[in-house]
Image (cartoon, rainbow, N blue to C red):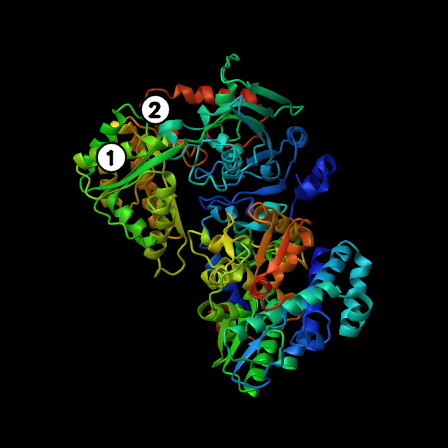
Amino acid sequence: MERTKIARDLSRLIGKNKVSVDEALLRIYSKDPLGNVGKALAVVFPISSNDVSKVVQYAYENDIKIYAQGSSTSLAGSSLPLEAGIVLSFERMKRVLEISLVNSYVFVEPGVRIDDLNFELASKGYMFPVDPASSSVATVGGAINSGAGGMRGAKYGTMRDWVLGLELVLPDERGSIVFSGCKTLKCRQGYDIVRLIVGSEGTLALVTKAYLKITPLPETVIVALAFFPKLEDLMEAVVNIKTQRIQPYILEFLEKKTAEIAAKSINSNINIEGHMLLVGIDVNREAGSRYVEWMKKILIRHGAREVQTAESWEEAEERGLFNIRRSLFVAQSKIAREHYKNVKDAKVMLLIEDIAVPPSRLVEAVEGLKELEKKHGFITMLGGHVGDGNLHPSIGFNALDPKESKRAEEWFKDLIDLAISLDGTVSSEHGIGLAKKDALRRELDARGSVKLLEIMGNIKKVFDPKNILNPGKVV
Amino acid sequence: MNNNLKSWLKKETSKCMFCGFCEALCPTVRFGSHRGYGPRGRINIVLYLSEEGKYTHEALNSLYSCLLCAACTLKCPANIDIPEVIRVARSLYARNNLKEKEEVVIEKEVS
Amino acid sequence: MRKRFLNIVVDIMRELTLKTGYPVPMNRGDIYSWAQDLDIETKGPIALYTGALYQIMPYIESLVAILEKVENNRALLEIMNIGKHLASSFLTKSLLRASHKRVKISRNILKAIALLLREADVNFSYLYKDDLYSGVLLYDLGLSESFLRQARKVYRTFKDRGIKKVITVDPHTTYVLKNVYPKFIDNFDIEVQSYLEVLSSRIKKKESKTKLEVVIHDPCFYARYQNMVEEPRNVLKASGIKVIEPKRSRKFTACCGGPIEALYPELSRKIAMDRVKELSSISNVIVTMCPICFSNLSKVKTKEVEIIDLALLVARVRGLMR
């Protein structure tokens, strides 16, 4: 259908200032971090569930695709308008509607940024613990739909553990508005639709409001930063920590070379004497020094060379103990850029991967990744949430060089095989989107479970009979 | 000369990886009506303009609503000089649409 | 509509700068009237150069008040467009009147700066009628050619008067002279220092009787563009004033929204309100050091909140001004 007609119709339905078909604007709502350029026909900025419902009715009637977007930071291509269609951007629905400490929930619109939500909660001593690296811009709606996780995943899990109930707009004739789940922590409402929607990447229904669980902020967190010359030793330390009747707040790993590059990128004066392990344990303030000593002992006993500790989160911040881990993304892009500095017309792309293996198999995973680095010749940056076995190996390549793009593809394929062979999974917290459809099939195939894809396909049809929501993604 | 400016803009804006981290600190995107009011939007609109895109209504809003406050540069992993991109893009627009003459030497503009 | 509005507003500022030397219609006398009874030397190699931004801001405020009305009023917009050709007289007399109170604040701030420099035994002269506008707004708007013409004029004036060094008073003028003029003007050889840099190393310590606590608002063009964050704090602390940091401070400071007040008044206002809310949650006294920040934050502040320029506050605390 013609762009101007869509604009006219939608303007009439929900208001002129909520619809744009401006060509320049459409361009930015058509892009994603993977370098894809899709085809937004119009971008719509609903401010209420009713707006969303009206747009859905219209799209249903006229067979137009709808692509929901939060802040478009998905690394799986989840929010790309692959075929011509309407981009539904939730950025204006960003209210925190209710914070209830007694009920342990927060009631929000999908466009609120995770950090903004946490800023409000922190003033009351609470938090929403799912913290993807993009939390400063990532929206709640996007996190729900991508099934996001983060650094605190080993202790607090991912989005599927924190969503109590969802208001949904269904892609049917009436754009039905329904509520799935409960306001209570316990909820047995037949089949668990809420958990089906979490991680469905906007392919089944549109999330217009959410009840999320919240939890108290820890009194404080003690922090230890350690470097291990031997990878096996580091992993042994992790195993040991994980069997000591504590559940670390964070347990982060950076491979030696990656840590060196990251430290260099921020001019850190911390000695990188091997692979880096960052441990945080939430404790009562009075217990801080006891835990620090105890943790230090464990780390040193397992062969850690340099160990730095802090008795509180504030002290750790002040001494910059998180800085190397936090600079990972900047370092990744810096390394890639520098590598192609002298290549004319290079379009440097980062491939940030997201596999997970059972933590007991992390040593094999890291060694396997090093072999892949040798085999394909990419500098591989490697870090991850070692507490839950989630690794984010990444490579940089020149997307304008067909040979390199091909090699990157092969690296990716091998990586997927590695994850599968180690009883792992191909996507831990980024989603399937466009990028991992084939990988998902291979994972299920390896488990003799391809049948599940058929079931997923049928679920999609039940929710979205006309295939208007984010077509071509996930299944 | 326009072409030199354009190719500089294209080179600089092509570095954007679309991560969106810049949007966290941008004052205008928080209160503006869409992502065009944020650094990621601006950079990608300038990229679009440098590839012969049209100076649409929203493209101009994007360019001229920037405060040049440079908060975004604290977060950009690609190290793009975002305010300078915006200023140069305005300069290009002014040359073609605001009767601004072209005497200024290119090196001075983007050195 | 937006495109036309943009083109006209930008065009007015350029035309006025090129014709009158200032981006808004005003009398040249308004630029140096602040120095009236200070008896500052007219000659000397080190000159105080205000770049006129403090003096211009009250007029910009009035202009913005008009623009807020014409933004959605086509007829008035076109009248302004015609008006600009009649340049200053038409606009000044018929439309633009700066508030007397506001003009006085700017005068006092500049006076305070001069008195503080004097107190610190800094020798300096003043340019009076040659205290030209730097053209920074034209630069920001991408009007490079017009900016260059203005910059040449300023530089020629400096050279004609034998000036070797200028002391600047606001972050935008400081930045454009220090970092941009050398790019645009061949062999630019004037040393540039902000009065805060000068004072930071020379101001004498003075204990204050009153326990004054203020929250500081760093301007983007000092904190981020010139990495100048300690200097203003040194000057405040040396005067016995306690500085409290807001959440967004130093190089992570948040913009006041001022730079887009003419083109996007509504958006600019929202940004200012957000910043005032953040700052006033820390202290009811907000210290600024940029005329644009002062204007834009003052516009949206509540009655209980006081916004005061650093120079004026320090001069008062040190008993140099009332």
Q: Are the residues under badges 2 and 1 in a single subunit?
A: yes
Q: Which residue is mark 1?
A: A293
- For badge 2, the amino acid type reads Asp
The nearer-to-camera label among 2 and 1 is 1
Query: How many residues crowd around disc 1 within 10 Å: few (fewer than 14), some, or many (20 or more)?
Result: some
Query: How many residues crowd around disc 2 within 10 Å: few (fewer than 14), some, or many (20 or more)?
Result: some
The residue nearer to you, when weighing A356 against C303, is C303
Q: Position of residue C260 (x, y in %)?
A: 63, 58
Give the left or right position of residue C7, taking residue A315 as reference.
Answer: right
Residue B22's place in the image compared with A427, above or below, is below
Chain containing the residue with disc 2? A
Q: Which residue is mark 2?
A: A445
Q: Position of residue A50 (x, y in %)?
A: 68, 29
Which callout, 2 or 1, points at the residue further toward the start of the chain?
A: 1
Q: Residue at x 55, y 71 (%)?
A: C116
Q: Residue at x 74, y 58 (%)?
A: C65
